[in-house]
Structure formats: structure tokens, C-alpha cells
Amino acid sequence: MKKKLFSEIPCIQGERISLRKILPSDAGALREMVDSPAVYRYLPTFLFEKKYADLDLVISRLYEECFRESILLGVYEQNRFCGIAEMYGYRDPIHKVSIGYRFLERCWGRGLATETIRMLVEYLFRETDIEIITASTMIENHASARALQKNDFTLVAHAVGEDWGFAEPLPTDKWIR
């Protein structure tokens, strides 16, 4: 029997990377990511890791404060923090969830996004009752769009205005799998 999405904090092991709970020891690498304007130029302004200035506080509250709305997992390569994978926007009646991801700038261009998406998709479809997975990207974020395409996501709406916490709605692309 498949489990409900928020019944546990998953640990997903792949060949090269793992997706698992973010630990206090990750605060330094998380700080590097949060402080990088390049990392967040294609992301919403209201992400949980930016909620508090103190990243130790962010990590300590991560799995109690936002767990029923979002599951954030660290992405690790050889036990080194590389970024965050997120499952959010859960809609139980239709078994739908959205995914997102962000990585340390020094980890870009190595296929981590593509592999992270693949692992999330496999986990969600095999282990949980999720039947629909969606993602949103800013239209300028071509790398993220390519990673979704490599994982058989289909573009279903182009340049739709969406509230990402900026002064005006941003044109985003909507993807589904």
C-alpha cells in the first residue's frame, strides 16, 4: 500500500546523490546558497530557508514549522550538501504535488537537477499516492526547463503570471508529469 506524502520525511538514495533531512551541520553550505543572488534570481522570494536570518533556526524549525505544507530535503553528493529539493503544494483530493529545487552555484552544470528530479519523480510515483507532479519555472530559466524535459515533464502553459513575492506577478512556465 502506498503511503500518504506527509507521513514521513523521506530519505531517497540514488547512485550518485541522496535526498535526505537537512542537518545542523549543513548550516555553512546553506548560508553559502542563501547568500548567493545568482542562486535565487529564478526563485520565489518566500522560500523557507530565507524566512529567518539565523540558518540554525531555519534548520531547527524546518521539519516542524513547514512540514505539513512542504517537504524540504537536502541534496547530497558524497555526503556534501549541494542544494535543496522540495515537494510542496500538496492537493490530497487529486493526489497532486509540485516540486522545486535549488543548488549551490558551485554545483551547477553537473546534472544534479536532472538527477534530483528523477529521484523525486520515482519516489513520488512508486512510494506515495501521488498521481500528478507539477513544476513552475521562470521563462528565463532554461537550465531548469531542460532538466524537467529530460524527466518527461510537459510544458502545459507558457508565460502565466504567478505571484512569486515580487512587486508584479512573474511570467512562469507550468510543467506537468
Image (cartoon, rainbow, N blue to C red):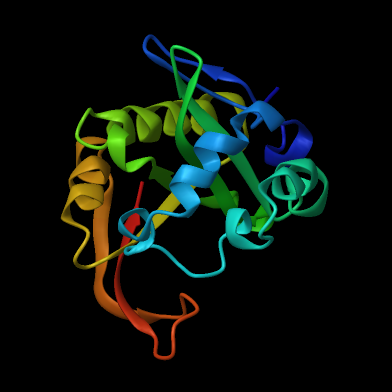
Q: Is residue 169 left or right of residue 48?
A: left
Residue 22: x and y in percent read: 64, 32
**Residue 141 visible at all:** yes
Residue 1: x and y in percent read: 70, 22
Seen from the viewer's position, the closer of residues 87 and 107 is: 107
Residue 116 sits in which quadrant?
top left
Residue found at the very far bottom of the displayed protein: 168
Residue 69 sits in which quadrant?
bottom right
- Above or below: residue 91 compared with residue 118: below
Residue 25: x and y in percent read: 65, 27
Q: Residue at x 19, y 35 (%)?
A: 109
Q: Is residue 130 left or right of residue 108?
A: right
- Above or below: residue 176 compared with residue 123: below
Residue 159 sits in which quadrant?
bottom left
Residue found at the very far right of the displayed protein: 64
Seen from the viewer's position, the closer of residues 24 and 121 is: 24
Q: Residue at x 60, y 49 (%)?
A: 95
Seen from the viewer's position, the closer of residues 39 and 64 is: 39
Q: Residue at x 77, y 34 (%)?
A: 7
**Residue 131 visible at all:** no
Q: Is residue 86 left or right of residue 6?
A: left
Seen from the viewer's position, the closer of residues 91 and 32 is: 32
Q: Residue at x 79, y 42 (%)?
A: 60
- Above or below: residue 46 compared with residue 67: below
